[in-house]
Image (cartoon, rainbow, N blue to C red):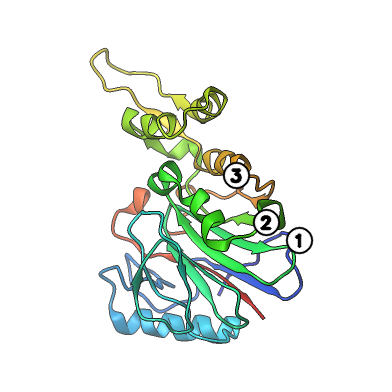
Amino acid sequence: MEIITPDWPAPENIVAAITTREGGVSLAPWDTLNISFNTKDKHLSIEKNWQLLSKELNLPSLPQVLDQVHGIDIVRAHSGGSNVIGDGSFSDLPKTVCAVTTADCLPMLVCNIQGTLVCAVHAGWRGLSTGIVKNIIRQLAVLPSDLMVYLGPAISQKNFEVGFEVKNMFLNSTSKPCLKEKFNSCFLRIEKKEENEVEKWQADLYGLAKMALNEVGIAKVYGGDFCTYGDPVRFYSHRRDGETGRMASLIWIS
């Protein structure tokens, strides 16, 4: 089982891990370590994968399960909590595991420099454009300068083709000309092959996330050098494969 350990200067009592698609029992197209019950994979396979992952990571508790809806809600995590709607969870209690699942969208793992607070966030373009980063600050109620963020595996710019509506969501999300310009710089126009072809752009999800984080005062940002689409051996990618599994990004206070 291949587990990615975030390379960031988190306090020693903060434990963070990100799964890959390797090391589980699920069959194609969810092969093999699919951990999401919101797929058409067999529940027995997903449950077995969670058992294998729990043993591998020595999880202190069952993670808070989220029904992710590409929104901005971030809820307080409870150990083994029932499935709740939200795109992130946080905790200030030891051994309470926060987790999100992804297969192209951006997982963000968050902690404070004091090691007393953790948060896991599912950030796709919808969440980023509608304020999920600002909601991190609201929910955690701490100084942004005390927070650090690790950006896990997501789709890279060269493989993330979007329409004008996505670009427009970011440009309309702020009234600040300087931020509009920064957001605009994260979209590369794709050259048309035919005159009547709809305009498309390549969106830099990592860049958009970093700008949103910096804008609220979070300067300690790490990671952001993966591509789920371009690495089919290690990562699931919904855009590449359609029906597929999900990776998990987990964080807790030991």
Residue contact at pointers 1 and 2, CB within 8 angstroms = yes
Residue 65 falls in which quadrant of the image? Answer: bottom left
Q: Position of residue 139 (x, y in %)?
A: 52, 61
Q: Residue at x 51, y 30 (%)?
A: 183
Helix, strand or loop at mark 2? strand
Few, some or many C-alpha atoms within 10 Å of disc 3 (few <14, some 14-19, many ≥20)?
some
Residue contact at pointers 1 and 3, CB within 8 angstroms = no
Helix, strand or loop at mark 1? loop
Label 2 belongs to which residue?
148
Label 1 belongs to which residue?
9
Label 3 belongs to which residue?
216
Query: Of the residues tagged 1 and 3, which is closer to the observer?
Result: 3
Relative to 90, does residue 142 appear above or below in the rendering?
A: above
Of the image marks 1 and 2, the number of the one nearer the N terminus: 1
Of the image marks 1 and 3, the number of the one nearer the N terminus: 1
Query: Of the residues tagged 3 and 2, which is closer to the observer?
Result: 3
**Closer-to-camera residue (193/73):** 73
Residue 171 falls in which quadrant of the image? Answer: top left
Relative to 173, does residue 144 appear above or below in the rendering?
A: below
Residue 3 falls in which quadrant of the image? Answer: bottom right
Q: CA distance from mark 1 to mark 2?
A: 9 Å
Q: Is any part of residue 37 visible from this angle? A: yes
